[in-house]
Amino acid sequence: MQHKFLEVFLESTAKYGAPYGPVRRNGVLTYDRVEKISDLVLSGEKTMIPAKKLFHPMRFDVFKFNEDGFTPDYSSIEKRVIIGLHPCEIHGLLKLDRIFDNPPADPYYMGQRKNSIIIGWSCAVCQNGLCKSTGTDIVEEGFDLFFVDVGEFYLVWIGSSIGYDMIHDKEEFFESTVTRDDLDAYVDWRARRDSSFMKSFNFRNMPDIMDMSYQSPIWEYFANKCISCGQCSMVCPTCNCYNITDHFDVSNANTGRRERYWDSCMFMEYSLVAGGHNFRGARADRLKLWYTHKLKTFGSQYAKPGCVGCGRCVETCPVDINVLTISEALTTGEVPKK
Ligand code: SF4
Ligand code: SF4
């Protein structure tokens, strides 16, 4: 598809659902509902908070309750077309699907998933992108359409029957024949992209290294730096823990609402149980849990990588604890100098 048709084509998808995608709000790129397709920022730039927030919101009411029982609140679930998800975001959602669709399925997350059409977007390599290392730099499932901007035109991959219908509705915008030159342009684009990654780590070796490093003093070194702020969990596309709190109405102690909000295993209270016992009171134990999930357990449990290489932990942790510094220290067995 030629670039000049893009906006009109995306506008035509409104009949499938409300448009969502990356937009700038107060100077910050974030996923949100858009009023106009022209407001979308379809580029290689990534948001600070990943697309998980559209399916697993930061904070929402799950139900209202009274003396007779409870009424689920599904009011935020609507038909949506989510435009502009990069491969790492789609891999993050595929991973969350395995968790939230595990019986009993989470009706809030799965409700949003079943009502959302995904239009994926190719990205330029970002400064801290590690997706080549984690094998999540391309995506073959989890989208209805996927646009690759090879320069002069978009190569559009169809991933579902709805994606096919979207194209069929506006087939005058698309060339159905893919020529040798088109494929060469794609191969060139892939080669340029593959050679532009600036950072990497040996993700494949990490499960074994994690196994052998449980007693490593390196954990204590990082624990002394960590301030338990939980930012790594907030920005990671595959972190999914949440807490719930009941709020009672002031006027009636038998009625109220149950709220659900993001939590982090990096917080000390996360593993606190009745009687005051804390399974992971030590910060080193919490760090070990987080990184064991990302670099080992999720892969073996769900056959999907626990780290999708987005690089957000590299950009966000205020004390430089991230998949790169952790994997390097555990691989070399050396405590970092700085
Ligand atoms: S590892 Fe970094 S981002 Fe995560 S809780 Fe510790 S200080 Fe915060
Ligand atoms: S561990 Fe870091 S690089 Fe990997 S997906 Fe999470 S935030 Fe992104």
Image: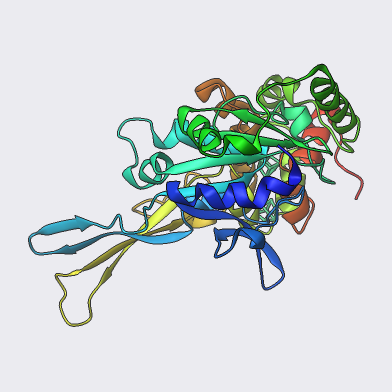
- Residue drawn at (35%, 44%) of the image: 111
Q: Toward the viewer: 158 or 41?
A: 158
**Residue 208 position within the rendered picture, expressed as x and y whole percent measured from the top left:** 69, 19
Q: Position of residue 186 (x, y in %)?
A: 81, 26
Q: Quadrant of residue 59?
A: bottom left
Tell me where residue 39 appears, x and y as whole percent: 65, 63
- The image position of residue 300, as x and y in percent, is 56, 21
Q: Is residue 58 left or right of residue 330?
A: left
Residue 331 showing in the rendered view? yes
Residue at x-position 91% and y-position 30%: 195
User: Which is nearer the eye, 155 or 197?
Assistant: 155
- Residue at image point 39% right, 39% down: 114
From what the image shows, is residue 82 above or below residue 191? Answer: below
Q: Is residue 228 above or below residue 152?
A: below
Farthest residue to the top: give it: 180
- The answer to whether residue 264 of the structure is visible from this angle is no
- Front-lying residue, 269 or 49: 49
Is 205 left, or right, of 241 in this rendering? right
Q: How is the image coloured?
A: rainbow
Apparent side of residue 275 relative to residue 9 in the rendered image (left or right):
left
